């Protein structure tokens, strides 16, 4: 059975097909020339046969496109819209800048935006409702941008065994969890440390910058976080976090969690802060298979020198088997592994800068 994946880039959405020994190939393109900030492939759950893509068209605005035939044809749906901003309201402008995350649970679709709004759709994306339970929290006024001028929701982690529960990662706004379909929220994250803040504020939960949070599907109480200031793992659904040490670097953006093995996750290390390139110009992946007690450095098939590709938040993905991985960079590099990261193949497709890679059904 062939694998299918999607690559959202600065100049279009690319469909990839993996056909055994033949490897990966580009099977189709959509929106060629347009920035695609996020894609939601088909998968289990609500409106599982519908794909969504978020496009950022500059002065033409943010658009949402949907496909009901596996990406062969697309039609436009309404984009999320913020309500009118009250006069004198504090915080960033109530205007949609970017769609940064899209996920589905058993009965609804979720969309995270920049600025930090969470939107919900109960009709397959035909309409979107801002979730005021989070937006109206006074804590939101303390959030700030992590790489963008305003804060954004980049990680949405529905609980696969609890229909109305989901957990969010916000840059820079910390870790939030709802157990009632986004009506009420609790700020979590004990153990996270923001070294960029003054010493007395480094453990404040509301100003943490989790670059990416992912959940183990089979053991959903286990979460992995690549934070601006390190690598963390939670074994109690985000309430407490244990800091881990990557052998090459604990800084990075991307993380992928094995769907069945709660001890296994992959990270892509980089030089911290303003530099943001692979350490020593050598691209590698850090993998743990024992819950973060130790890490392996995976380099086979990856550039060992002269490489300055950065893998961003959504640039690393693993399929449902836990064997196949894809990794895409902000300079258009794309690598694949068919053995859990032990060996990598440069797909040499020369793509535009990559914003997100996602497996079909993942």
Image (tube, helix red, strand yellow):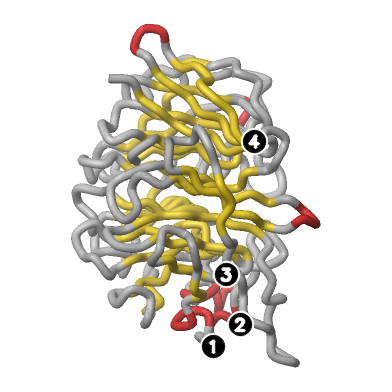
| Camera-nearest label, 3 or 1 | 3
Q: Residue furthest bottom?
A: 87
- The quadrant of the rendering that contains the N terminus is top left
Task: Answer above or below: position of 217 versus 240.
Answer: above
Say which of 181 and 191 sits in front.
181
Q: In this figure, which residue is indicated by the disc labeled 4? A: 12
> Which residue is found at the position 28% from the left and 74% from the top?
179
| Left or right of 146 in this view: 346 | left
Distance of mark 1 from mark 2, alpha carbons?
6 Å
Q: Residue furthest top?
A: 21
Q: In this figure, which residue is indicated by the disc labeled 3? A: 116
> Which residue is found at the position 39% from the left and 69% from the top?
189
The percent position of residue 180, horizontal first and vertical second, equals 29, 77
Counting residues from the N terminus, which is met first, the one under dot 2 or under dot 4?
4
Cβ atoms at labels 1 and 2 below 8 Å apart:
yes
| Left or right of 184 in this view: 305 | right
Distance of mark 2 from mark 4, alpha carbons?
34 Å
SS class of the residue under badge 1? helix
């Amino acid at each position: 059975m062939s694998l299918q994946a999607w690559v959202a880039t600065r100049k279009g959405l690319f469909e990839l097909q993996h056909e055994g020994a033949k490897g990966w190939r580009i099977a189709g393109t959509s929106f060629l020339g347009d920035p695609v900030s996020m894609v939601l492939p088909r998968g289990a759950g609500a409106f599982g046969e519908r794909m969504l893509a978020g496009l950022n068209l500059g002065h033409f605005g943010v658009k949402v496109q949907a496909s009901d035939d596996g990406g062969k044809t697309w039609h436009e749906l309404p984009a999320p819209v913020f309500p009118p901003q009250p006069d004198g309201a504090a915080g960033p402008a109530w205007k949609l800048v970017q769609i940064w995350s899209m996920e589905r649970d058993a009965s609804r679709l979720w969309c995270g935006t920049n600025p930090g709004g969470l939107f919900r759709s109960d009709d397959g994306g035909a309409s979107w409702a801002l979730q005021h339970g989070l937006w109206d929290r006074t804590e939101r006024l303390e959030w700030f941008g992590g790489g963008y001028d305003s804060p954004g929701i980049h990680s949405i982690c529905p609980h696969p065994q609890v229909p109305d529960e989901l957990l969010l990662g916000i840059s820079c706004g910390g870790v939030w969890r709802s157990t009632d379909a986004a009506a009420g929220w609790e700020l979590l994250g004990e153990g996270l440390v923001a070294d960029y803040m003054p010493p007395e504020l480094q453990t404040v939960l509301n100003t943490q910058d989790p670059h990416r949070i992912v959940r183990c599907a089979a053991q959903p109480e286990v979460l992995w976080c690549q934070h601006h200031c390190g690598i963390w793992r939670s074994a109690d659904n985000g309430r407490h976090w244990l800091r881990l040490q990557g052998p090459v670097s604990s800084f990075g953006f991307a993380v992928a969690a094995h769907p069945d093995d709660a001890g296994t996750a992959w990270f892509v290390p980089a030089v911290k802060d303003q530099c943001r390139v692979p350490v020593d110009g050598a691209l590698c992946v850090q993998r743990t298979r024992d819950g973060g007690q130790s890490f392996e450095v995976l380099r086979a098939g990856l550039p060992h020198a002269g490489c300055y590709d950065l893998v961003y938040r959504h640039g690393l993905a693993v399929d449902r088997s836990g064997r196949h991985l894809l990794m895409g960079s902000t300079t258009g590099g794309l690598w694949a592994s068919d053995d859990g990261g032990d060996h990598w193949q440069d797909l040499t497709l020369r793509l535009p800068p990559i914003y997100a890679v996602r497996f079909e059904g993942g």
